[in-house]
Amino acid sequence: MWIVAVAWVYVVVLMAATEPTIVHGLMTFLFYCAVPLSILLYLTGGKRRRARREALAKRKAAEQESGPGGN
């Protein structure tokens, strides 16, 4: 997934570089790259966030089970 994101950033940077003004280039970068990639990476990261949340819950449960002294 990361290689696709990096390749897309590269393509959009080249597209933005060919725009006639800086404002057009920034808007191209924002609306073709930053916004869509942030949405895509957020949607595809759901499993990682869920796994991280479950691991944190298990760790807290294990800490509570072992007691406040950690024995």
Image: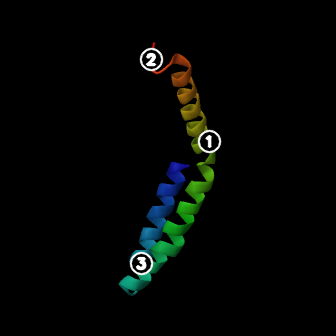
Q: Reply above or below: 42 against 33.
A: above
- What residue would you read off at disc 3? 26
Could you tell me which residue is drawn at 50 percent across and 19 percent down? Answer: 67
Q: Amino acid at mark 1?
A: Arg
Point out residue 4 in the picture as x, y percentages from the top left corner: 54, 54
Residue nearest the observer in this picture, 59 or 33: 59
User: Label for residue 70?
Assistant: 2
In the figure, is residue 55 to the left or right of 27? right
Could you tell me which residue is drawn at 39 percent across and 76 percent down? Answer: 17
Q: Is residue 68 visible?
A: yes
- Please tell me whether mark 1 sits on a helix, a strand or a loop: helix
Residue nearest the observer in this picture, 20 or 64: 64
- Determine the CA span between mark 2 and mark 3: 53 Å
Q: Amino acid at mark 2?
A: Gly
- What residue would you read off at disc 1? 50
Q: Amino acid at mark 3?
A: Leu
* First of labels 2, 3 by sequence position: 3
- Determine the CA span between mark 3 and mark 1: 34 Å
